[in-house]
Amino acid sequence: MPVKGWIEVDEVYCKACELCVNACPAEVLEISKDRLNPTGYHPVQLVGNGCTSCMICAIICPEAAITVFRENVLSREKKAETEVNH
Ligand code: SF4
Ligand code: SF4
């Protein structure tokens, strides 16, 4: 079962350099077109459900603006097991 991940962007720090957009192997990052942060940049946003929580975007971001989250797979499997047993 693929790992499900997601990210959060601290938009205040994003400079829209697109390093993360170009580095994401799942191609699930884009520059927002309709929002501006306080310094006048269009911040990055997550699109779709394809994030694998690989961490590449967070590592490459020069502003450390990205935090990566990963679904707790063990909890999910335990829950599925519990549901099967009931
Ligand atoms: S963690 Fe990986 S897959 Fe997810 S948005 Fe970042 S680079 Fe893309
Ligand atoms: S690498 Fe960081 S600063 Fe550059 S676009 Fe992505 S989130 Fe914004």
Image: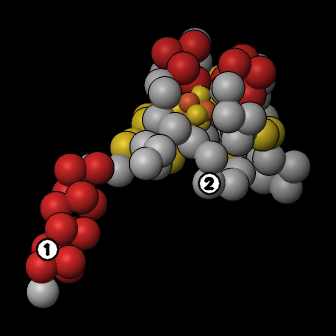
* Element assignment for label 2: loop
Q: Read off the residue under disc 2.
A: 49
Q: Nearer the viewer, residue 11 or 80?
A: 80
Q: Is residue 73 left or right of residue 1?
A: left
Residue 70, x across and y down, in percent: 37, 43
Image quadrant of residue 49? bottom right
Q: Read off the residue under disc 1.
A: 82
- Tell me which residue sits at (49%, 15%) in the image: 59
Q: Amino acid at mark 2?
A: Asn
Residue 86, x across and y down, in percent: 12, 86
Image quadrant of residue 9? top right
Farthest bottom residue? 86
Q: How is the image coloured?
A: secondary structure
Can the viewer see residue 7? no
- Label 1 – label 2 distance at C-alpha: 26 Å
Point out which mark residue 30 bears: none
Q: Earlier in the sequence, mark 1 or mark 2?
A: 2
Q: Amino acid at mark 1?
A: Thr
How many marks overall? 2
Residue 53, x across and y down, in percent: 47, 35
Q: Nearer the viewer, residue 13 or 64?
A: 64
Q: Residues within 10 Å of mark 1 (few under 14, many from 20)?
A: few
78 relative to 19, above or below: below
Farthest front residue? 85
- Tell me which residue sits at (49%, 27%) in the image: 54
Q: Is residue 42 left or right of residue 7?
A: right
